[in-house]
Image (tube, coloured by chain):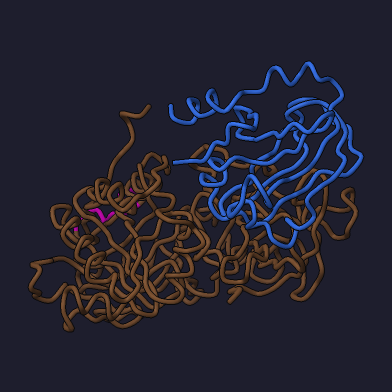
Chain colours: A blue, B brown
Amino acid sequence: MSEVPDELRYTKEHEWIRIEGDNVVIGVTDYAQDALTDVVWVELPEIGAVVGSMESFASVESVKSVSEIYAPVSGEVLEVNDSLEDSPEQINEDPYGNGWICKMAISDPAELVDLLDGATYRSLIEE
Amino acid sequence: MENNLVRTSLYESHIECGGKIVDFHGFELPIWYSSIKEEHMATRSTVGIFDVSHMGLFRFVGHNVADWLSGIGTQDFRKFTEGSCGYTHFLDEDGNLIDDMIFAVKSENEILGVPNASMVSTMFEWFNRFLPEDGSVKILDESEDMSIIAVQGPKSEEAISRVIGEDNRIGRFRCREIANNDLGITGWIQGTGYTGEKGAEIFIPNSQATILWKELITTGSEIGLVPVGLGARDTLRLEKGYLLSGQDFLWPGLGISPDVNLPEGFLCRNTAETHVPFGLSMNHEFIGKSGVEKFLDDSPRWAGIRCVGRGPSPRPGHPVLSSESVDSEIIGYVTSGAPSPSLGGIGIAMAYLNEADIGQSVWIKASPRRTVEAIVVSPPFL
């Protein structure tokens, strides 16, 4: 059974979003890491990159395949989790903690309304 | 669509083992059970079992059957004695590789062959085109009647002897009928596989598949045996530089496109270009021989590439470049590539390259955003 913390927001593409004032922290969900299995490489976004909502800006690679990561909202990349370059397995071990991917400044707070809450995401993955 | 998918006799066993089922060329088979990495490492260190029942099984029967097959395949079947196995390619008249095949010489008058899953009907038609008019050779397609379980890894012999007895230990590239055993398993066993490890492939009637699989799982678990899915099967063969039909070569006669983006006709290759050091005997006449001869000295070669550092892994369809810049000259394309579980996740690949030398540096365009440095190597990677 995948963990879906209620305090986070989600996308249908299995990303989680933690809202911290004007910024968001982004990662992939427990369900996603379980489906990917062993993550072997994370291609991080560039710091300072300005991306549009649902634009592909990073990727997570398992032995079998590469999954694109889409920006859940429009904004600018402020920080990336460099430690994933050496220890990509943190995505499997701690998807909501040490496995975070990047922090972004939100350019349009109205877009946050489109994100899913925990209950909605939970029902999505239980389908 | 779903109704057209074929389930092997072991489908329920895969579900019981926790297999994640995918559509693999029309077969419902597990991509993994626990994880590709774990199953890969278990096969390298102890033993893994694989359901490869999707592969075909042909029985070639007749007087002088080895002579006849030698006229069609790149291998000289006459060099193989009773009870031994070998590897061959089959080419069309122009020398293009149609399919590769492991074969086993059962007797002077009978040879068994294992065509690739998606090539069974094509190869059956191909062989039938060349049957002698006097009826002296016959081909039986037993693909649907038989299940195949591969037992691979350093402890494979121990797993086999625990389950079907000491008498069924089999040496590398040897083959024979399964000897009497307490489990009542009958059929054929050969010391072959697709992992580069010690091991065997066991051919049994569909009705016995579940019995053998379950006994291997139960008894084998004491020595670390695990079921292995298609994902690890692919990384295991990649580390040894083995060709995958349809992915590393694709016969134009099929009229289909590869799964990935490659230049038109890129996967139309002959045996010389695949650079596979076994299976080619130029001392006899066979279909497509002149097409191979032209390429023996000077042609693109299927070579290994090993990434220098960590980064995005090479994948099928990635361009290989002569220098670091994303705009530099393309000298080939990756046909198979993945992070190597045995090498700590370093990216490895097989690619057809123009004029590349062993030890040379190349760059793989492994993502739209970057290139990664790699060294041309001679497979196997380990």
Quarter in which the N terminus of chain A is drawn: top left
The relative height of residue B308 versus residue A22 in the rendered view (above or below) is below
Whether residue B288 is visible, yes or no, is no
Quarter in which the C terminus of chain A is drawn: top left
Residue range in magenta is B127-135
Residue B176 at x, y percent in the picture = 21, 75
Q: Is residue B154 left or right of residue B355?
A: left
Q: Quadrant of residue B52?
A: bottom left
Q: How many labels were placed on the picture?
A: 0
Residue A97: in magenta span: no
Residue A85 at x, y percent in the picture = 75, 58
In this orientation, which residue lies closer to the viewer: B362 or B139?
Answer: B362
Q: Residue at x 46, y 67 (%)?
A: B74
Q: Is residue B372 left or right of residue B199?
A: right
In this orientation, which residue lies closer to the viewer: B23 or B43?
Answer: B43
Q: Is residue A93 left or right of residue A1?
A: right
Q: Quadrant of residue B252?
A: top right
Q: Residue at x 15, y 59 (%)?
A: B211
In this orientation, which residue lies closer to the viewer: A106 or B162?
Answer: A106
Q: Residue at x 50, y 65 (%)?
A: B237
Residue B196 at x, y percent in the picture = 46, 73
Q: Residue at x 31, y 72 (%)?
A: B200
Residue B133: in magenta span: yes
Whether residue A27 is visible, yes or no, is yes
Q: Quadrant of residue B121?
A: top left
Residue B372 at x, y percent in the picture = 79, 58
